[in-house]
Amino acid sequence: MPPLRCETWVAFLIYNLLALCLSGVGASQQATVFVYPRDVNPYKHPYSVLSQPSDYKAYMDAGITQFIFTGDMDLYGSGDLHLYPNATYIQSISKLVGDRARVLLCFSHYYDSNLPKFRRDAQALIDATGAAGVLFGTYMERTDGKAYKYWRLLNKMMASIRSLKGRNGRRALTGFWFDGFNPGPTFWLNLKKSQPWLNADYAYALIFSVDEVRTSYEWARDIADRFIEASGDGSKLSFILQCYGYSAPDASPFVVRRYYELIQGGADPRGNGTFNGTFFHSPYQIERKATIVDKYDLLGMGVNAVDGDLPPTNPLSMVRVITRSMSRLDTAGSLRVQ
């Protein structure tokens, strides 16, 4: 066999370099669980959700890379930050998950009357919990002309968090979630004007399941389109799906059912997410939404109200469907940078 010419070697090297680069297109994706008090202390629930350390391991084994613990801020009194559950519990989970997953805190209300106090309190909570940072929940679909003011406030709070130290002494992470129930033109206009992504590491769109439209592929795609149109970048955006099903808002009686009840009751996993007049995120619909995450290079997907899900060991659980549907989910150390 004659030796390869120089030009052939160059072409061979270029080909392999291109293949290597293309194989790494797109950053690693995140799979997130929002943790609420009822998830840590489940009541009237047939499954252990997140009450024991072994439960968190089961979720990480299923592919979850991020746990977000919720709290709120005292709007009318001291402005103190309140976590549910307490800081000691969250610290134990931070130690448990180590580098396999990230722990974040999320407050559903905020205000800036005393930013220095807020920074001190937030840093103290980060230190006490071992969290990587602090997020904020937003209710910004306002029609009273004050929405832009609140988006500017959100930017100030996120900038404050970015000045703090998170896990292992690295810069604290921050971001926001927003209600994807009915974000209208005013919402997107205020989002574009205020540019919260300049200070945010992450943005989460909570997608509810209250009718056939809002559980659809098209609804999630529209949210991604509008977010990218406003921000120019979808790499910080995740879809967060609710593990509950609802009847139509005008139904009588109005029905709320957990996802596991719907599946166990006979709902078709390959269906469009309707069962006996109730709408939900079916495995088929979740898989379709995951194609949006891949196509648009979004950050990822996740769930809230996880007490409504099947156990993460069940292949039909929403968590399991989400993690196996995203093509770039990295559960083998992608979080070691933070």
Image (cartoon, rainbow, N blue to C red):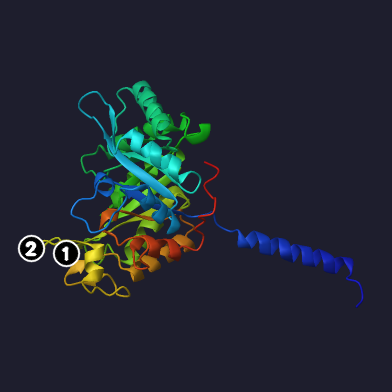
User: Residue tagged by mark 2?
Assistant: 253
Q: Amino acid type of disc 2?
A: Pro
Up the image or down, 148 lies above or below 228; here it is above
Residue furthest out toward the right: 2
Q: Which mark is residue 247?
A: 1
Given residues 266 and 115, the one toward you in this image is: 266
Query: Badge 2: few (under 14), some or many (20 or more) residues near its Cα, within 10 Å?
Result: few
Q: Gap in Å between the C-alphas at discs 2 and 1?
A: 9 Å
- Residue 1 sits in which quadrant? bottom right
What element does badge 2 sit on? loop
Residue at figure coordinates x 44%, y 65% from the top left: 324
Query: Badge 1: few (under 14), some or many (20 or more) residues near its Cα, within 10 Å?
Result: many
Q: Residue 23 carries which label?
A: none
In this rendering, the count of numbered labels is: 2
Given residues 48 and 326, the one toward you in this image is: 48
Drawn side of residue 172 relative to residue 20, left or right: left
Residue furthest out toward the bottom: 1
Residue 170 visible to the viewer: no
Drawn side of residue 297 relative to residue 81, left or right: right
Q: Where is residue 101 in the image (x, y as percent from the top left)?
A: 46, 48
Up the image or down, 6 lies above or below 162; here it is below
- Residue 251 sits in which quadrant? bottom left
Residue at figure coordinates x 82%, y 64% from the top left: 10
Q: Amino acid type of disc 1?
A: Ser
Given residues 140 and 114, the one toward you in this image is: 114
Q: Where is residue 49 in the image (x, y as percent from the top left)?
A: 30, 53
Q: Mark 2 and mark 1 in contact? Answer it, CB < 8 Å.
A: yes
What element does badge 1 sit on? strand
- Residue 321 sits in which quadrant? bottom left
Residue at figure coordinates x 32%, y 50% from the top left: 50
